[in-house]
Amino acid sequence: MKRVTGIGGVFFNANQPVELRAWYQRHLGIDVQEWGGAAFRWADAAGNPSKGSTAWCIGAADGESFAPSKSSFMVNYRVADLDALLQALRDEGCDVLENTDDSGYGKFGWVIDPEGNKVELWQPPAGQ
């Protein structure tokens, strides 16, 4: 079974998220959108667009989206079969969170790594 197939996004929290987003936009040229992040579209080696993107987002340090982790970041990994992977992780004794999400954006599940970081696992919708 394939496990992780790529990185779907990088999310981190900041004490001053608006100011930090502006810094990244001004100094690194990241096209930060109203929702607080950017989507980096994928391309092949020749620069031709391909299906998929990687999200990048800065949230508020007092937010709860990374709970129960106390970490200031979370990486979202693309997976081929979320249900099978979550079951395999449970069978291997990993700390898999019980809640999952299934929406138009795909299927999401979470596991806590040995350092206490919340890891997001994402199965994109069919065709993406």
Image (cartoon, helix red, strand yellow):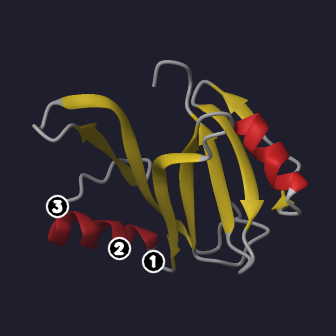
Question: Where is mark 2, residue-wise?
Answer: 19
Gap between marks 3 and 1 measured at Cα: 19 Å
Question: Where is mark 3, residue-wise?
Answer: 29
Quadrant (top left, top right, bottom left, bottom right) of the C terminus = top left
Could you say which is closer to the camera, residue 106 or residue 38? 106
Residue 94: image x %, image y %? 83, 63
Image quadrant in which you'd find residue 51: top left
* Tag 2: amino acid: Glu
Q: Decide: marks 2, 1 in contact (CB < 8 A)?
A: yes
111 left or right, relative to 59: right
Q: Residues within 10 Å of mark 3 (few under 14, many from 20)?
A: few
Which residue of the protein is positioned furthest toward the top in this rendering?
127
Mark 2 or mark 3, whichever is nearer to me: 3
Residue 117: image x %, image y %? 68, 72
76 left or right, relative to 24: right
Residue plotted at (39% across, 53% down): 37
Residue plotted at (68% across, 41% down): 108
* Tag 3: amino acid: Gly
Residue 32: image x %, image y %? 30, 54
Which residue of the protein is positioned furthest toward the left in this rendering?
46
Could you say which is closer to the camera, residue 53 or residue 19? 53
Quadrant (top left, top right, bottom left, bottom right) of the N terminus = top right
Question: Where is mark 1, residue-wise?
Answer: 16
Gap between marks 2 and 3 measured at Cα: 14 Å
Q: Secondary structure at mark 2?
A: helix
